[in-house]
Amino acid sequence: MTDWKVPLSDIDLGAAEIEAVTEVINRRWLTMGPKTEEFEQEFAHHHHAKHAVAVSSCTAALHLSYLALGLSPGDEVIMPSITFVATANAAVVCGATPIFADILSEDEPTIDPDHVESLITSRSRAIVVVHYGGYSSRMKEIMRVAEKHSLSVLEDCAHAPGVRYDDRHLGTLGATGCFSFFSNKNLSTGEGGMVTTQDDEIAEHVRSLRSHGMTSGTWKRHNERPQDYDVSEAGWNYRIDEIRAAMGLVQLAKLERANARRAELVARYRNRLNGIEEVRVAFDKYVGESAFHILPLVARDRATRLEIVVALTEARVQTSHHYSPVHLFQLYREQFGYKSGMLPRTESFASRQVTLPLYPGMKDDDVDFVTEVILDELQGKAGRSSRVGTAP
Ligand SMILES: *Cc1c(COP(=O)(O)O)cnc(C)c1O
């Protein structure tokens, strides 16, 4: 593994998580039980959600949400292509057809509600929004389009835990919200996920499908009089376990402060890069809360992007790319006939986007170092004239 001077992200785990996990091990009940219930209740409370159902990943959360919405072969699901492939894959395994809508702009790379509406057909069943980078999609417009055409909305909240939107939270506006606790996410348990919903039936259905479609869980059978269970439909084992739930509780308690620290770092990045015409930080004019999951930089052109990536890598700063557009992956080209050129704004954004380091433990000096490398590289080529603003 490369020894990065500034890594892309870093987990914030310490004594509290170790203590919580040790307690579970000492209590000797490992699979889904009381800690998981506590985690679900706390998570629901924190997001003002009626229900929260913990699962093994966000991919599982998406899959179970699609099933709970009744997605079946032939159905179309409209979603952005700027997302992690799981958003689309989980619909494909249900036999559905992903219909990709373009993003609004390079400054607001979330799904374009007008383009969504233009893609609706008699086969459309659902609209999926991805709150990219932790920034809300245009939920008011999306909900209006969905209501008008009687479609369900599903929120991929993998980047957006703990984000208020008006008097609600992201994840409680659509039929379900799907959260990820993968290692590099804002709230991390290694692997894990959560489905939030305001709908009692969906919650019950997801709970059942999470554990083989069984009518009673292991913990219940362990504690109550021996009883038989019934199986109402074929489900999966998408359960989380007590060790992860215990970590999740500690991480949830840290979330607000961690997101606030991310906000400070993003403000510093914006300030340092302000006025540099070759690059811009996305969501420049965004109003509202964000979980600031990643720092998406957009270069003027493909060559400038490459130049920045090379300079940062040489300076041992780790970068990433969010994302390779899903519609251009082989599966999506071959099975669904997508081609490059179909989503111009998405493709242009993806060809110029680079993700810079961002994590709560990052130091102000780290931001200064990263931005200096970028400024030196751009100025080395173009001269000082390209620098309009002066960083404090
Ligand atoms: C990480 C991620 C997922 C998948 O989450 P897992 O918990 O790894 O399954 C889905 N959608 C988006 C946008 C993601 O970033």
Image (tube, grey):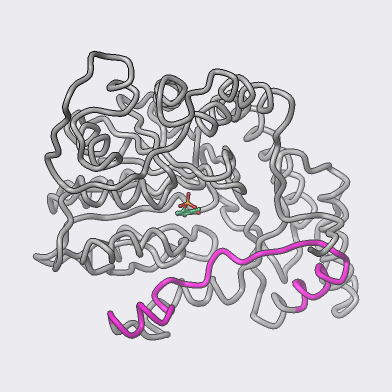
Residue 329 included in the magenta stretch of the image: yes
Considering every residue shown, the one lying at the far front of the view is 226
Q: Is the magenta stretch mostly helix, strand or loop?
A: helix
Q: Residue at x 71, y 58 (%)?
A: 356
- Image quarter of the N terminus: bottom right
Magenta stretch in the rendered image: 307-336
Q: In x, y percent, where is residue 335?
A: 29, 81
* Horizontal arrangement in the rendering, residue 38 relative to residue 335 (left or right): right
Most foreground residue, 387 or 168: 168
Most foreground residue, 159 or 350: 159
Q: In x, y percent, where is residue 75?
A: 16, 64
The relative height of residue 69 versus residue 44 in the rendered view (above or below) is below
Residue 325 included in the magenta stretch of the image: yes
Q: In x, y percent, where is residue 305?
A: 69, 75
* Horizontal arrangement in the rendering, residue 48 relative to residue 65 (left or right): right
The relative height of residue 338 versus residue 231 in the rendered view (above or below) is below
Q: In x, y percent, where is residue 198?
A: 26, 30
Q: Quadrant of residue 276?
A: bottom right
Q: Residue at x 43, y 71 (%)?
A: 326
